[in-house]
Every structure is written in C-alpha cells, then in structure tokens.
C-alpha cells in the first residue's frame, strides 16, 4: 500500500464576518495559511478560531458528516465543512477561497445562521411516519428489501441545509418548501407503512410545492450525502399523477401537454402546449407571442414538421404509457 | 483530420421558436466541415416535463431517439441543454440497469428497434471542444470578436448533475467554475466576462407556472452580465436563449430595472468569428436587437 505524500500550499481565505449584536453590515477578513492536502474545510475554520481570532463563530459537532451542522459555503458552493477536503476546493476554485455562511442574509454571527425557515418547511411536510401501528404489536411490521429500496437513499438526509440554501427558488419565493423538505416528504411517501394522505397533496400545492421547482439541479450537485433531491422532486410529481392527487392546473397540464403534442406530431407543438397549459389565460402571452411572430419565431400548427415514422411513436405511446390523467 | 460526422438531434425549438439556432448550427458545421445527419425520426425528449408525468414512457421515447443514432453508428449530438440532459440521463439509466434496459427494449422491439447503448450522447459545444478542438477554431477565425466583452451563460442542463454530464464528454466541466464556453469565447477572439450568474438558472422551465420566479432569475442573469460590462451574452441552450432574449420586459419588471442585452446562440457566435453572414446565422430572428452589425 502506498502512502500519498502530504503536500502543502498557500491559500488565501476571505472570510465572512458579522455579529448581529454589534454590526450593521458584514465585512470580510483575510487570512493566508499553509494548507495540507489532507485537511478538510472544518480544519480551516478551527485554525481561524484557534490561531487567529477566538471570536470567530461556527457550528460543529460530530466531524463525521452525520450531524449536518457545519454546512457553509466555499466560493458560493454549499458544502459540509467536515466532509469536504481542501484539495477538492483548491482543485475547483484555485488558491483564493471565500468562506461564507450558507445564507449571508440569515447570518447571526459569522458562519452561524438562523435556519428557522429551513426547519419550518421541514416540519410542514410531516417528516415522520404516519401509520396505524399498534403500540405493542404482536409481530414485526416488516418492510421487504424491495420496498425499502424505494426510499432511494432519501432516509440518509442529515438536514444540513446545503441544498435548501443552494436552491434559487427558496431565495425568491418564501412559500417554497425547498429540496430538503421535498426529499423528506418523498422519504415518507415512499414508505409502504405510511398512511398520511395530506403530505402528497401539500407538496403539490402551487407556490409551495414541487411544481415551482426550476429544475436547475443545484440541490443534487451540493448534497453531501448523495441523496439527489431533484430525483425525489421528480418522483413526487409522478406520485401525484399515479395516486390521483394531481390538480388540474397550469403546471400539471404543462406536463401532460407534452404527451398530447408528441402523440400528434412526434415533436412538440410549442404554441399548442402553451394553449393547452394556460387555457384562456393564454391572452397574457399575446404581446410576447406577437413580438416572436414578427421575428419568425412562431410556427403555425399546420406548418409543424412532424417526426418521420410517427406511427412508431404513436404505437409506443399506446403500449408504454403507465399513467392516466 | 478525418471528417467529423454526427447524428444530429435538433430538438423541437430549433425547428420552431429558434430557427436561427438551426441555421447557425448548419452554417458552423459547413464551415468546420462537420457532417450532421439529422435524426428526422426523433421525437421530443419530453423536456424534463413528460418525465414528471410518465417516467417509463419518457425512457422509451428517448431510447428510441438514441436507437436511431445507433443505427447510423454515430455519436448523437444535441444542440439543446435540456435535450442533452434527458437523452444522456436515459442513456445513463439504461446502461446502468440491465433490467430496465430489457423492459424498454421489449417495447422498442414492437417497432423493430433496439437500444444497445453504443452511441455517445454529447452537446455540440463539447463535440467541438473534444473532437474538433478550440485551437483549430482559433486558427480559422477570420473576424475575431475582439471588440466585445461576452458573457457566457452555461445553462443548468449542460453542467448539472456533473456526474452525469462528465460521462458525456472528455473535457471535464466543473459546475461551479465552468470553463468550456469561456474558452470558446476566447477562441473566437472575444473577451470572456466573469459574473455570478453564468452557471445559474434562467427560469425557463417554470415560465408558465411560476412566472415571477422565472422572471427574477432571467432578469438577474442579464443584470449580472450588464454590471460586469458585457456587450452581449452567449448560450449553448435555446431554452435559456428564449428566456433571456424574448422575455426582457417581464425580466426587467421583476428586477426593477431595464435589462436587455443581445443574446447569441453559441453557434451564432462561432459563425460570426468564422465569417458567416448575418443571414446565414439567422440574426434577424433574434428578438433583442443585434446592435453591433
């Protein structure tokens, strides 16, 4: 077994500082340190506190990627400080690194933020098993390995908030539950023992629910536990259709509209999709549509070039469809 | 150099709302002597929305598209980030899961097709970088974009999830610090602009159901590019292009300031540098005026 040689390099850190008790505005402090290839981001936070400024504040506990409390941002990337190696950060961003809390606008002191909105949303999805299981059951409530696989690692979430504060929608729409809450909702919706009927309805409501996800996949990219919240969001969409709780609204019609278009043309009828999704509300799109029409960007339905071998597509839709709306 | 040849999956917008993207793709391919065989049998990829409704059907339809590229024995090239994501994701899932692949192939057999997993699926941007080479592009530039600061807008579905995306091309891309489009701008003689939103979301996918969110995202992106002295933006994704180019009114309202920049498709930018005419590149179809020609 070969032992990798430990290398050292100089790294310039720009560190976010703010104390809500005494500061009006945040500021940044610069530190230059020799960093070894085997250090993690948390080691740097410790060294700032121990070697430079004892007042520097951050949360830490398990140091094993389990408690989820030390998540911060390095050059804008949400990261779990105790798990993220410095060599990866240097490889990603070079030797100038900016250390910030997960959300600067929620900062209380340095890296410590008020995660109230995260917990509020988490609680809103009933993140526990709702089941009529006898307090003193006479036998075990078995879950088969196949059924357990359905959770798809959603139960590994440590509520670190990395995905929540990487999600652009959370920053724009304060009602939006966010990827961590959706992953938690999926974890219990996918549990065969769960009998809560309300959770799936709640996560499909407009404004707060999965339909406002912009599909940027930032959540999946940052998750330190590899949970892939984006795929859980997709599965919650699918569940809503399968379990018949999907409402007839612009978002669901937008998804179903693709099928109608593909069935008819193979390719998408862009205008038809908007009409199908919006219904009479299509009038609000008229100004943009006219502008696009003038620029030759609107193809009339009768001029759409259909896919060759359309009969194949139609046959496959007939034989492979698994959902009805 | 051996002539490069690919199976082209145009996607739907190139044939409808972004005709300039189709025109400039073909113009650039001609200049670079790349042969593109258009997959006229292909269906829509579902644009990440059909997947929300019926996952299995979406897999079958995307596998059918790839099967046609395989029939040609060619790498499939996409010109839309979302087409790239959905097609590459289908390939990834089928290649990793033999049982799922068998179920999909059972359906494809009904129409005499088979998904084998033999064709790579890659975006035209990466085909150019990996196979053609930016150095060669640089040598071929006749009208460098040296007078312009150009803001790259990468588009989510070309860079995330990075694990999947980096299976689709040789040159690795870091989703937090992407460089491919910056490198392309430099190869075309332009000055690349660094700004916070270059690897962020444009909001296109929720334009109908969450118009405010979509408009804030697009508006912030254009504002970020503007504040860093960009003269124009460039994107490899026609959906980002539609959002940034045709929706400036709602974007401006959402961010509380007038935002508007010319937005080029990646292919239009390359085409300009290689000396293609405005007509060849379909510049008249861009909504935000191309004010530098």
Image: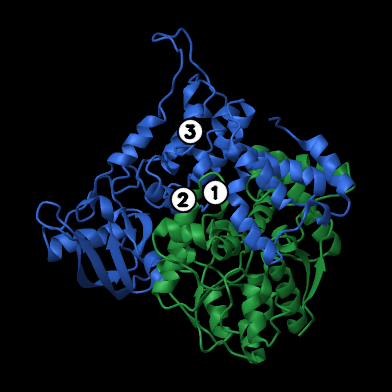
| Distance Cα–Cα, label 3 vs label 1 | 16 Å
Residue that mark 1 sits on: B206
Q: Is residue A228 visible?
A: no
Question: Which residue corresponds to the image point at 26% horizontal and 50% vertical from the top-left?
Answer: A106
Label 1–label 2 contact, CB within 8 A: yes
Q: Chain B appears in which tint?
A: green
**How far across and how far down the image is residue A43, in percent?**
25, 59
User: Does B108 appear above or below A50?
Assistant: above
Given this view, does label 3 or label 2 mark the residue nearer the observer? 2
Whole-percent x, y for residue B134 in the image: 61, 82
Q: Is residue B34 above or below residue A189?
A: below
Q: Could you tell me how far apart the alpha carbons at marks 1 and 2 are, in whole angstroms?
A: 8 Å
- Disc 3: host chain: A
Q: Quadrant of residue A100?
A: bottom left
Give the colour in which the image draws chain A.
blue
Q: Secondary structure at mark 2?
A: helix
Identify the residue at image location x=73%, y=60%. Answer: B16
State the image coordinates of residue B81 (x, y, percent, origin top left).
62, 61
Residue A232, position in %: x, y?
Answer: 53, 40
- Residue at 70% from the left image edge and 84% from the top image edge: B276
Residue B165 shown left or right of residue A177 in the figure:
right
Tag of residue B69? none
* Chain letter of the residue beneath label 1 in the structure image: B
Q: Mark 1 vs mark 2: which is more N-terminal?
A: 1
**Residue B73, above or below A174:** below
Most foreground residue, A228 or A254 = A254
Q: Which residue bears the numbered disc 2?
A: B213
Q: Which residue is identified by label 3?
A: A203
């Amino acid at each position: 077994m070969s032992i990798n040689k430990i290398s050292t390099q100089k790294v310039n850190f720009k560190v976010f500082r703010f104390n809500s008790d005494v500061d009006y505005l945040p500021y940044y402090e610069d530190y230059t340190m020799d960093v070894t290839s085997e250090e993690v981001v948390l080691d740097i936070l410790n060294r700032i506190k121990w070697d430079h400024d004892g007042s520097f504040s951050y949360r830490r506990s398990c140091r094993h990627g389990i408690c989820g409390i030390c998540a911060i941002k390095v050059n804008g990337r949400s990261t779990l400080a105790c798990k993220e190696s410095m060599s990866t950060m240097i490889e990603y961003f070079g030797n100038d690194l900016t250390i910030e809390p997960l959300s600067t606008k929620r900062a209380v002191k340095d890296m410590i933020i008020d995660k109230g909105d995260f917990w509020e949303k988490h609680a809103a999805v009933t993140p526990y098993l709702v089941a009529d299981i006898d307090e003193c059951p006479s036998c075990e409530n078995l879950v088969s390995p196949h059924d357990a696989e359905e959770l798809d690692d959603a139960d590994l979430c440590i509520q670190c908030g990395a995905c929540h504060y990487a999600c652009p929608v959370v920053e724009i729409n304060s009602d939006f539950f966010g990827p961590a809450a959706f992953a938690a909702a999926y974890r219990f919706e996918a549990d065969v023992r769960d009998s809560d009927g309300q959770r799936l309805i709640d996560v499909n409501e407009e404004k707060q629910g999965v339909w406002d996800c912009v599909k940027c996949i930032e959540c999946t990219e940052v998750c330190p536990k590899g949970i892939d919240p984006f795929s859980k969001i997709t599965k919650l969409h699918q569940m809503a259709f399968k379990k018949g709780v999907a409402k007839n609204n612009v978002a669901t019609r937008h998804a179903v509209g693709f099928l109608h278009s593909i069935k008819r043309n193979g390719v998408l009828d862009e205008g038809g999709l908007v009409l199908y999704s919006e219904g009479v509300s299509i009038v609000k799109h008229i100004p943009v549509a006219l502008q696009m029409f003038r620029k030759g960007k609107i193809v009339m339905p009768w001029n759409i070039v259909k896919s060759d071998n359309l009969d194949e597509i139609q046959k496959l839709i007939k034989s492979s469809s698994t959902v009805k709306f | 150099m051996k002539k490069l040849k690919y199976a082209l999956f145009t996607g739907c917008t190139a044939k409808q709302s972004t005709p300039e993207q189709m025109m400039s793709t073909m113009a650039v391919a001609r200049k670079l002597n790349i042969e593109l065989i258009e997959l006229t049998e292909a269906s829509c990829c579902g644009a990440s929305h059909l997947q929300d409704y019926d996952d299995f059907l979406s897999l079958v339809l995307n596998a059918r598209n790839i099967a046609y590229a395989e029939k040609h024995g060619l790498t499939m090239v996409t010109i839309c980030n979302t087409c790239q994501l959905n097609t590459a994701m289908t390939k990834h899932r089928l290649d990793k899961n033999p049982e799922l692949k068998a179920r999909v192939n059972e359906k494809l057999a009904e129409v005499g097709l088979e998904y084998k997993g033999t064709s790579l699926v890659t975006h035209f941007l990466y085909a150019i970088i990996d196979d053609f080479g930016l150095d060669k592009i640089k040598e071929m530039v006749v009208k460098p974009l040296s007078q312009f600061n150009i803001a790259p807008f990468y588009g989510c579905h070309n860079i995330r999830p990075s694990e999947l995306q980096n299976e689709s091309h040789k040159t690795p891309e870091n989703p937090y610090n992407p460089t491919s489009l910056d490198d392309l701008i430099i190869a075309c003689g332009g000055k690349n602009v660094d700004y916070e939103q270059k690897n962020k979301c444009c909001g296109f996918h929720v334009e109908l159901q969450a118009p405010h969110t979509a408009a804030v995202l697009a508006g912030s992106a254009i504002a970020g590019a503007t504040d860093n002295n960009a003269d124009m933006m460039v994107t490899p994704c026609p959906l980002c292009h539609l959002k940034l180019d045709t929706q400036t009114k709602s974007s401006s309202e959402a961010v509380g300031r007038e935002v508007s920049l010319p937005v080029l498709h990646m292919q239009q930018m390359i085409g300009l540098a290689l000396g293609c005419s405005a007509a060849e590149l379909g510049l008249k179809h861009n909504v935000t005026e191309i004010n530098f020609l």
